[in-house]
Image (cartoon, rainbow, N blue to C red):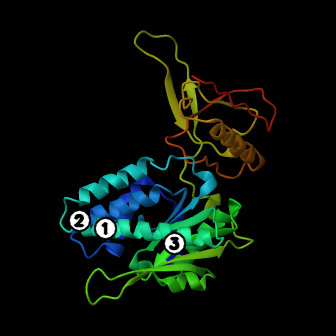
Amino acid sequence: MENMSEAIIRTLRKDDYPALIDLVRRTWYAEYDERTGLLAAEADWENCLARVTTAFVAELEDKPVALIVGRIDELDHRSPLNMHRRHSLRKLLQLAFAHDGMAAASEILGTLHVDRQLRKQAANIGHEYSAEVVLFVLDPAARGHGLGRRMFETMMSAFHAAGIRQYFLFTDTTCDVGFYVHRGLTQVCEQSLPASVPGENPSSFYLYEGSVPERRDVPPSGNTGRLEHKLVCRHTVHRPATKGLTWQSSAKELPLGKVFTPDFRFTIPSFQRAYIWKTENILQLVSDLDDACKSPGTPLCFPALPFPLMVTCMPSATPAGIFTVTTSSP
């Protein structure tokens, strides 16, 4: 694989999942048959997504070749037993009926247990964090071309933009620990597990911590990597009353420099999200919109939400820089 400098770093999309799950399978579960390895990779993948708020993919020739995902605590308002966690548990149950599936499930659950112990050890000696690099993986053919450095720096940019000072990650002897040492991370604690096969070396697991550099470049195209939805203005077109026909809608994307002008005001329909949104979710939306008004050329991202946000845009005589967000309870 050549021309890694031409790889595009962008936010993770759902259509990336199959290729990246297969990359996880080939990286960590290649010793199992294809079905068992795929189930294990899917369980691992969903478990990672259950705590991820920020995700970047490197794409080359329309194919994802690298992934880095992270968690920023203040951006995650989901339940601990969220959709991805439930999917992960379902895949673990399916492993029970697959060839060597119990071994794969034990490997995943054992690693999660060690991670919890490492985090507890770190907390006991005064190391607390508000951000984590959850998963970092490159296609073997993509290594050695500087792409890993670019991916890691992109995540650091996202952490910096969120005001993160310190972060941590879990790693082990199957990973390139030297990469993290070279990036300035330091080991905080370690745990070892006995070898699962006689004659093999025991596995060592580590918690490393790092400081976010004071100044980082803005992520590519102003992208924060947050798993969110771009603002789409949905213009409702009123048609003359015709029997059997109702309202028709069309949607298109507009730059913020156009959206945040006196031409529009914003409302959240009373029927939407009232049963799931809390006060802090609404305040976060208002804060994001306020920040966007100050930087109209910057793409707008919303906090991670259970399903896409629809914003209705209507003509308004509101002065420039002012907008209206209307909500109501059920």
As helix, strand or loop, the secondary structure at mark 3 comes to: helix
Categorize mark 2 by other alpha carbons within 10 Å: few (<14), some (14-19), many (20+): many
Pinpoint residue 17: horizontal percent, then vertical percent: 39, 58
Q: Residue furthest bottom?
A: 199
The quadrant holding residue 213 is: bottom right
The residue carrying mark 1 is 106
Q: Nearer the viewer, mark 3 or mark 2?
A: 3
Number of marks: 3
Q: Is residue 79 above or below residue 204?
A: above
Q: CA distance from mark 3 to mark 2?
A: 26 Å
**Residue sitting nearer the eye, 128 or 227:** 128
**Residue sitting nearer the eye, 36 or 148:** 36
Horizontal side of 166 relative to 106 (left or right) equals: right
Categorize mark 3 by other alpha carbons within 10 Å: few (<14), some (14-19), many (20+): many
- Residue type indicated by callout 2: Gly
- Residue type indicated by callout 3: Leu
As helix, strand or loop, the secondary structure at mark 2 comes to: helix
Q: CA distance from mark 2 to mark 1?
A: 8 Å
Horizontal side of 322 relative to 209 (left or right) equals: right
Of labels 3 and 2, earlier in sequence is 2
Q: Is residue 57 above or below residue 226?
A: below
The residue carrying mark 2 is 101
As helix, strand or loop, the secondary structure at mark 1 comes to: helix
The residue carrying mark 3 is 118
